[in-house]
């Protein structure tokens, strides 16, 4: 579209045609394993994330088959426990926590006009820690007599409540694999977060003031600060758990005066801000996609940045709304009800701003925009059920029912996964130099949006009818059967959509339309580089004078900085 | 990139950004503070909850000398920082070595305290809830002292072999930030364990 309206030097080295000899393969492998380049590490994070999205998705499908009919025996109860534990742990820690740094690594240096992240080697270390943490988690299926005995994969749910994880009740190694692998990935997350903050604060190109940072960068900085405060309490609690299990400690041992409830507190001090750690980078993607496809600058830039900080701040004080049924004083209940409702205000500001950005815009419904539009609607609905659940008496009724499952999947899938897909469709041309197929993309979107609503809209109903989460099966006379059948069918539709996406990713890599530098006519600096960008990113250090540097380049007669 | 965007005089001003080393160290300190917070909360929450002895009142002695040693190492490292800033490498090395000795002395003091607790008072990490929380919290701090000492030692070796120059002042100050943090945490641990909990 606009690739030739301004001069861009091409890559300095021309790529030689590859011959697939053994030496070439080893060299290729070596270049990926030893890389400290932010773009390659970003791609590694994304490939890792998508791979585990498929694995976690397969686990979800197995769960849905088991729940399809009453009294099913598709898997054994023991395997079922491992499936839902691993599904949750995988999706949160191996998919959610890695897509963040996939996008952040690839895009932040490009968006702020830097050569690389602030600490490239720390960046590589962080990725490989995360990588081996994930391997360790999945090794649990075969490690420690796993294959021969009943298996060692974690089976205590993703929150691993005490005292179930104490030696007396979990004699094998399943909580150990859970704790150790997440401590390792946690260290990776801390390293990556430090890197993101240092990069965004210290590596900006000339003129890129904090109020000109693309919102994606802003939100990732907020996310990283939140991650620093969030992952560490989990690490601390997991160290305590291991002390209990291996050194005979009594932190969560009620028979020696310890407390099982304090585990729940520690876990949710991690667990609730974690949700915002996952969702803020999704907002970040929407903040970039929605303006470009509405052909308008983002509405309320300072309000967006401030609302992100507000969400992060408030989210640190809401954790016990996961614990209404454990029992608290009425003051405690009131505090956590109100603080939880408070999150609705900055979140509402964001939704208002996205809608206002679209309002009166010349909207192009390309695939990235489709996903982000669906995201806005679905995230609003998810927020509304969240407000319902924040009311303690309502939560007493519905806690740990499928209503809660439906609510948080509405956030995790309806908001986060939709934004991830939107982001991939948006930046894939930059990363590979080729467009993803729009036809397959539309199929992917419509099947996924239908599958999503069939699954998660109807999942609320068995919850209201009293179906608890994490149950192996259910008798036929409860009135849940039909709803569960619908939900499972929706799951299969989503799976088909994701497979189309996977096909699209691979096929377009070889056969996609050549993208050019700036296929979407966008405004942030990454689109000023060739696609894919050369190793050094920018031949000369860019200088920016507004929030939309490429707009200024393309429209010298009407530059943005006049209005900022 | 094209240079066409340079049209506003504001872009010609000096472009100053914070030091990435300091930012990163502050971030690490934030993360570490969260870890310590959880262990401190676990300690405070469990004060007096042990169902059987020994209790802190029976076995703990206030390590005043040890605390003075550790806290004074913050002063010596501060002096070392000032000297490297002005390029006085010899004096820097002297104060840096003294910092290392003070830190190591603290660790020895902790070792003596633990030896007495384990062999004389029979308190281990698995004896009771007090033992679990005490050794975890004090041990978490001690492990940070050990990491800090390793870093101090590396810089000391580089100083002795003549590799440390004035231009390394900022990196050394970043490392010193960590040491100040370790000292500051001790004030919290000391207050919680030896004053509130005893």
Image: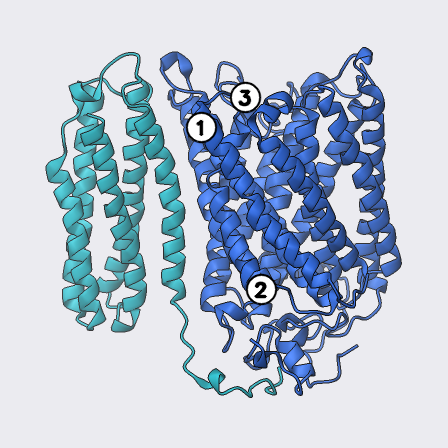
The alpha-carbon separation of the residues under discs 1 and 3 comes to 12 Å
Q: Position of residue A437 (x, y in %)?
A: 85, 60
Point 33% across, 26% down: residue: B45
SS under mark 1 = helix
Position above or below: A283 against A170: below
Q: Which chain does the numbered disc 1 sit on?
A: A
- Residue at image mark 1: A332
The answer to whether residue A164 is seen in the rendering is yes
- Across and down, in percent, residue B136 comes to 33, 31
First in sequence: mark 2 vs mark 3? 2
Task: Say which colour chain B has.
Answer: cyan
Kindly indicate the quadrant of the structure image that contains residue B140. top left
How far apart are labels 2 and 3 at the CA level? 39 Å
Q: Earlier in the sequence, mark 1 or mark 3?
A: 3
Q: Colour of chain A?
A: blue
Q: Is residue A126 above or below residue A70?
A: below
User: Which residue bears the numbered disc 3?
Assistant: A325
Question: Mark 2 highlights which residue?
Answer: A301
Taking the image as drawn, is residue A241 in sight? no
Front residue of A290/B156: it is A290
Q: Which type of secondary structure does the marked residue at label 2 adopt?
A: helix
Mark 2–mark 1 distance (CA, rounded to whole Å):
35 Å
Residue at 18% x, 62% y is B80
| Dot 2 alpha-carbon crowd within 10 angstroms: few under 14, some 14 to 19, many 20 or more | some
- The C terminus of chain A - image quarter: bottom right
Residue depicted at 23% across the width and 27% down the height? B197
């Amino acid at each position: 579209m606009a690739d030739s309206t301004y001069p861009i030097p091409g890559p300095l080295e021309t790529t030689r045609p590859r011959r697939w000899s053994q030496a070439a393969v080893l060299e290729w492998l070596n270049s990926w394993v030893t890389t400290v380049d932010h773009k390659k590490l970003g791609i590694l994070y994304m490939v890792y994330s998508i791979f585990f999205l498929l694995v976690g998705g397969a686990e979800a499908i197995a769960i849905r088959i088991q729940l399809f009919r009453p009294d099913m025996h598709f898997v054994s109860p023991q395997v079922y426990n491992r499936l839902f534990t691993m599904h949750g742990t995988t999706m949160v820690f191996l998919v959610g926590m890695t897509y963040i740094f996939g996008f952040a690594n690839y895009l932040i240096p490009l968006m702020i006009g830097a050569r690389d992240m602030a600490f490239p080697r720390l960046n590589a270390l962080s990725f490989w820690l995360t990588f081996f943490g994930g391997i360790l988690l999945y090794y649990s299926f075969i490690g420690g007599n796993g294959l021969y005995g009943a298996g060692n994969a974690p089976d205590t749910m993703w929150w691993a409540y005490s005292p179930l994880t104490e030696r007396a009740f979990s004699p094998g190694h399943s909580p150990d694999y859970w704790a150790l692998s997440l401590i390792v990935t946690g260290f990776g997350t801390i390293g990556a977060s430090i890197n993101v903050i240092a990069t965004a604060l210290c590596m900006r190109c000339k003129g890129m003031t904090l109020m000109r940072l693309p919102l994606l960068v802003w939100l990732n900085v907020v996310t990283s600060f939140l991650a620093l405060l969030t992952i560490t309490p989990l690490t601390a609690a997991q160290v305590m758990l291991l002390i209990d299990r291996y050194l005979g400690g009594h932190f969560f041992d009620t028979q020696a005066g310890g407390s099982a409830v304090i585990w729940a507190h520690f876990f949710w001090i991690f667990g609730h801000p974690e949700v915002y750690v996952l969702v803020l980078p999704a907002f970040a993607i929407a903040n970039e996609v929605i303006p470009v496809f509405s052909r308008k600058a983002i509405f309320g830039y300072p309000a967006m940045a401030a609302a992100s900080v507000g969400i992060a701040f408030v989210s640190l004080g809401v954790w016990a709304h996961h614990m209404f049924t454990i029992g608290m004083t009425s003051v405690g209940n009131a505090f956590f009800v109100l603080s939880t409702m408070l999150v609705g205000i900055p979140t509402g500001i964001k939704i208002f701003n996205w809608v206002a950005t679209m309002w009166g815009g010349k909207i192009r419904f390309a695939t990235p925009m489709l996903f982000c539009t669906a995201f806005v609607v679905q995230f609003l609905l998810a927020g509304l059920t969240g407000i319902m659940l924040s009311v303690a008496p309502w939560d007493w009724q519905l806690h740990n029912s499928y209503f809660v499952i439906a609510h948080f999947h509405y956030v995790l899938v309806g908001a986060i996964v939709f934004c991830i897909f939107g982001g991939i469709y948006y930046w894939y041309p930059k990363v590979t130099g080729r467009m993803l197929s729009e036809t397959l993309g539309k199929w992917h979107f419509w099947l996924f949006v239908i599958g999503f609503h069939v699954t998660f809209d109807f999942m609320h109903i068995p919850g209201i009818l009293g179906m608890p989460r994490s149950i192996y099966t259910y008798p036929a006379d409860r009135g849940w059967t039909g709803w569960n059948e619908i939900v499972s069918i929706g799951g299969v539709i989503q799976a088909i959509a994701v497979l189309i996406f996977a096909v699209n990713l691979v096929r377009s890599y070889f056969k996609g339309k050549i993208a050019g530098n700036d296929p979407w006519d966008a405004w942030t600096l990454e689109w000023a580089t060739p696609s894919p960008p050369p190793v050094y990113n920018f031949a000369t250090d860019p200088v920016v004078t507004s929030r939309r540097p490429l707009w200024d380049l393309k429209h010298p007669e009407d530059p943005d900085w006049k209005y900022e | 990139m094209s240079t066409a965007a340079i049209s506003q005089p504001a872009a010609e001003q000096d472009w100053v950004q914070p030091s990435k080393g300091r930012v990163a160290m502050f971030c690490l300190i934030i993360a570490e503070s969260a870890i310590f917070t959880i262990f401190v909360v676990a300690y405070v929450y469990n004060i007096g909850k042990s169902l059987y002895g020994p209790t802190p009142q029976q076995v703990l002695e206030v390590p005043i000398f040890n605390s003075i040693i550790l806290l004074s190492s913050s002063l010596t490292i501060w002096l070392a920082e000032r000297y490297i800033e002005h390029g006085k490498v010899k004096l820097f090395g002297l104060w840096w070595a003294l910092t290392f000795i003070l830190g190591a002395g603290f660790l020895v003091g902790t070792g003596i305290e633990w030896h007495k607790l384990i062999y004389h008072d029979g308190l281990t990490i698995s004896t009771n809830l007090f033992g679990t929380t005490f050794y975890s919290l004090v041990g978490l701090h001690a492990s940070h002292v050990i990491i800090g000492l390793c870093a101090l030692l590396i810089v000391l070796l580089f100083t002795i072999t003549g590799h440390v120059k004035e231009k390394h002042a900022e990196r050394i100050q970043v490392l010193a930030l960590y040491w100040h943090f370790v000292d500051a945490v001790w004030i919290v641990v000391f207050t919680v364990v030896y004053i509130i909990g005893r």
